[in-house]
Image (cartoon, grey):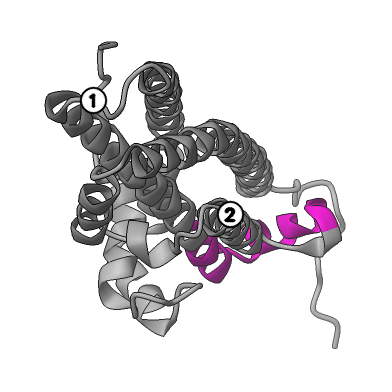
């Protein structure tokens, strides 16, 4: 078996502080940050909020890299199992147990990708609510959209692709929606060689899809962090310029009052 790289089910560091707290105070199916999120952000000043979101970009990219690598490992391993199954009636129970573990990990990978997209979209919503200058940067995105809407599109596309793959094998998304139903479905499929092959083929296809989807998600995160960096630089430049103007105004030498005619009282 290839070495499994460890991935966290929680988002890391700053983004967790910003985005996952927002999730906790909004409905589970909320697509954008609501008034509750706006109220929560008042506990942070502008610099703290920006720092929490901004510093998490590299950590999120690293997590997406780990997820993508794990999906590739699962894809490779499932292909090996398919080849083995072609030469035997069914896979031995101990080997099928590893298949179940791999496919359950694959389900977890899908969930992690969805969580990252949801959280990054929420972070985008909060920043737009707090900073008007940040909101104007959306003009640089396709169709004057927002990263929140782009992440939602990615999420919908990913789920639809997985659903289509499952449907093609006469399976439903519900059967792979959570760990309990996934394991129940896999136990039923393990009873026949056809069922095992179907599970392996579906898993292999979904793993390949997730490798591609995580690459797209990494691209979105990178684009978002680049835009945020540009915005922060612009904001700082404006502040520095305003400060320089203030210092110049208040530090200027007062005009001389000597050399003019003396005022005389005339009767």
Rendered image quadrant of residue 2? top left
Quarter holding the C terminus is bottom right
User: Which residue carries the number 1 mark?
Assistant: 6
User: Which residue carries the number 2 mark?
Assistant: 168
Q: Is residue 3 left or right of residue 223?
A: left
Relative to 13, say whether 135 is above or below: below
Task: Name the residue located 24 percent from the left edge and 38 percent from the top edge.
Answer: 100
Question: Where does residue 77 sit, x and y in percent of width and height?
Answer: 37, 19
Task: Name the residue located 42 percent from the left edge and 48 percent from the top edge.
Answer: 116
Are the residues tagged 2 and 1 within 8 Å (C-beta)?
Answer: no
Question: Where does residue 145 sit, x and y in percent of width and height?
Answer: 75, 63
The residue closer to the viewer here, 144 or 99, is: 99
C-alpha distance separating marks 2 and 1 = 31 Å
Mark 1, Cα crowd under 10 Å, few <14 / some 14-19 / many 20+, is: few
Quarter holding the N terminus is top left
Q: Secondary structure at mark 2?
A: helix
């Amino acid at each position: 078996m290839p070495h499994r790289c460890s991935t966290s089910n929680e988002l890391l560091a700053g983004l967790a502080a910003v985005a996952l707290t927002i999730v906790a105070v909004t409905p589970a199916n909320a697509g954008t940050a609501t008034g509750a999120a706006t109220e929560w952000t008042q506990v942070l000043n502008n610099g703290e909020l920006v720092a929490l979101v901004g510093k998490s970009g590299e950590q999120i990219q690293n997590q997406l890299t780990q997820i993508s690598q794990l999906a590739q490992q699962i894809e490779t391993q499932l292909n090996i199992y398919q080849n083995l199954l072609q030469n035997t009636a069914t896979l031995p129970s101990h080997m099928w147990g590893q298949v179940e573990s791999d496919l359950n990990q694959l389900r977890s990978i899908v969930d992690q990708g969805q969580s990252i997209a949801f959280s990054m979209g929420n972070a985008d919503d909060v920043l737009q609510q707090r900073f008007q200058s940040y909101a104007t940067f959306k003009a640089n995105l396709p169709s004057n959209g927002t990263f929140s809407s782009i992440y939602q599109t990615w999420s919908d596309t990913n789920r639809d692709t997985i659903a289509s793959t499952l449907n093609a094998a006469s399976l439903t998304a519900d059967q792979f929606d959570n760990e309990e139903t996934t394991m129940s479905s896999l136990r039923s499929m393990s009873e026949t060689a056809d069922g095992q092959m179907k599970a392996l083929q579906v898993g292999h296809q979904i793993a390949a899809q997730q490798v591609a989807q995580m690459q797209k998600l990494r691209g979105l995160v990178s684009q978002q962090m680049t835009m945020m960096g540009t915005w922060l630089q612009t904001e700082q430049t404006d502040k520095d310029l305003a400060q320089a103007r203030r210092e110049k105004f208040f530090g200027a030498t007062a005009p001389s009052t000597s050399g003019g005619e003396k005022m005389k009282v005339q009767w």
